[in-house]
């Protein structure tokens, strides 16, 4: 960094109504270790998949560092040293507790809140504040967006979606208050706009569309000025960052063009959402990586499907609905198809971890400074079990976590204990959440 000035961590590029945050650069870090630590924040994302998993194919064998990855989790082998797999965690408040059927809705509603939802299909919904929003309430002011909520399937907050439970419970895992869910965004372009502040007034937006300029074009002059002040390493990092941003813009544009070309007569295809599911899932993962890379937010949720999702997965030869198959009654054919769905999602998750690990930050990688929880509020989807949940946490939480292990609870333990430990690493001061009993200290470095 010698010969170049230190620049503030909250530096933005600006131009014609667009604002772009930057990744962490060497020039943003002072020479003192204490200040350097504060410029490398910890982030947390909570990724949810519905319908549980085929647990015999999910659970690793062995425990601690001496374990073997299962068939479903095998795609995570390249990241083994950077993740923890948990067995024995439960969300007790996802259970019926006298309310009868509706486990899919309860699994989503309780997943991050640790609370039992009021059974209603009316307006009097109530569950609890989710862990991501607990964190956002305390550290959200440090970033431009307090939190980010994304997903793949559009939801709704009214009507009956599961045995008398409101669709709000099935459609959301993020809850700002006990009665207010935080709606997810499934449109990649809308997420891109939120991340880079492209909410121009009508006149500026019209002008930008007319000259067909991308965000990078709008901030080019500011970027050129900044690059002159950077060292070679930071110049290279900035070029790499710009390339990834433009690639996402181009992918969004291609998906929009594809939608136009495939639009049947008299049928309006939803704009901006890729037709290909893999592209949609991975594009949202990439946007999440950008959000963390630029420190636009430090807290996010990502729903890979609404509770009870009945999507098909023809890309792996599964043409029956996901939820329908989850009631498999131990029929081998259905179990095998569900395992293919589980593994497909793990492959996409592994790709995301690779993206985070490819981004250098501070003395390590972006993945080192993240906690990415990947899991479901159900284990056995056929029996609707809310214990022994499938949970993986990737990343080292700012190098404060032991990783590379299969952590097996000796007896059923609240998932919320893990949340307390994650909140500590986010610098959110919380004594309890849901039915938490104590922090999950087994992960402490």
Image (cartoon, grey):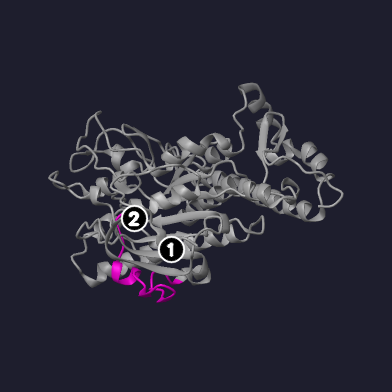
In the rendered view, tell whether residue 75 sits above or below residue 91: below
Residue 387 percent across, percent down from the top left: 25, 58
Rate crowding at label 1 as few (under 14), some (14 to 19) or many (20 or more) other CA atoms within 10 Å.
some
Q: Between disc 2 and disc 1, whose residue precedes?
A: 1
Left or right for 333, reference 407: left
Q: Give the spatial CA distance, label 2 vs label 1.
A: 12 Å
Q: What stretch of residues is rendered in magenta?
A: 51-74
Residue 431 percent across, percent down from the top left: 37, 43
Residue 98 is covered by the magenta coloring: no
Q: Which mark is residue 48?
A: none
Rate crowding at label 2 as few (under 14), some (14 to 19) or many (20 or more) other CA atoms within 10 Å.
many
Residue 361 percent across, percent down from the top left: 65, 55
Q: Nearer the viewer, residue 122 or 98?
A: 98
Q: Which mark is residue 346?
A: 1
The residue tagged 2 is: 376
Query: Residue 13 occupies which quadrant of the picture?
Result: top right
Does the rendering let one see residue 48?
Answer: no
Query: Residue 363 occupies which quadrant of the picture?
Result: bottom right
């Amino acid at each position: 960094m010698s010969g170049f000035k230190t620049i503030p961590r909250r530096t933005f590029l600006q131009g014609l109504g667009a604002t772009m945050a930057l990744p962490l650069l060497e020039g943003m870090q002072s020479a003192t270790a204490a200040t350097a630590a504060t410029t490398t924040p910890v982030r947390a994302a909570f990724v949810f998949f519905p319908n549980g998993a085929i647990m015999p194919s999910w659970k690793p064998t062995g425990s601690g560092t001496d374990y073997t990855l299962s068939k479903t989790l095998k795609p995570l082998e390249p990241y083994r040293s950077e993740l923890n797999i948990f067995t024995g965690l439960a969300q007790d408040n996802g259970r019926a507790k006298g309310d009868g059927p509706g486990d899919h809705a309860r699994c989503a509603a309780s997943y991050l809140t640790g609370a039992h939802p009021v059974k209603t299909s009316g307006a009097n919904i109530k569950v609890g504040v989710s862990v991501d929003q607990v964190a956002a309430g305390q550290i959200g002011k440090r970033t431009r967006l307090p939190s980010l909520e994304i997903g793949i399937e559009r939801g709704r907050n009214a009507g009956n979606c599961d045995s008398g439970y409101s669709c709000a419970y099935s459609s959301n895992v993020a809850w700002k208050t006990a009665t207010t869910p935080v709606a997810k965004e499934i449109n990649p372009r809308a997420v891109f706009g939120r991340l880079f502040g492209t909410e121009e007034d009508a006149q500026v937006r019209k002008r930008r569309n007319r000259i067909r300029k991308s965000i990078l074009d709008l901030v080019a002059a500011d970027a050129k000025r900044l690059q002159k002040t950077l060292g070679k390493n930071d110049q290279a990092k900035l070029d790499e960052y710009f390339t990834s941003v433009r690639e996402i813009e181009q992918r969004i544009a291609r998906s929009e063009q594809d939608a136009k070309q495939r639009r049947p007569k008299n049928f309006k295809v939803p704009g901006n959402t890729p037709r290909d599911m893999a592209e949609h899932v991975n594009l949202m993962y990439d946007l999440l990586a950008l959000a963390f890379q630029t420190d636009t937010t430090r807290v996010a949720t990502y729903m890979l499907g609404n509770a009870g999702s009945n999507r098909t997965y023809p890309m792996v030869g599964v043409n029956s609905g996901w939820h329908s198959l989850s009631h498999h009654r131990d029929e081998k054919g259905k179990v095998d198809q569900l395992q293919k769905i589980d593994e497909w999602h793990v492959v996409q998750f592994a790709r995301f971890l690779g993206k985070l690990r490819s981004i250098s930050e501070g003395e390590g990688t972006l993945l080192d400074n993240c906690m990415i929880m990947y899991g479901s509020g159900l284990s056995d989807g056929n029996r609707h079990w809310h214990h022994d949940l499938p949970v993986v946490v990737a990343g080292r939480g700012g190098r404060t976590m032991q990783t590379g292990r299969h952590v097996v609870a000796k007896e059923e333990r609240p998932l919320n204990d893990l949340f307390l430990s994650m909140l500590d690493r986010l610098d959110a001061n919380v004594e309890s959440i849901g039915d938490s009993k104590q922090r999950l200290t087994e992960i402490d470095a």
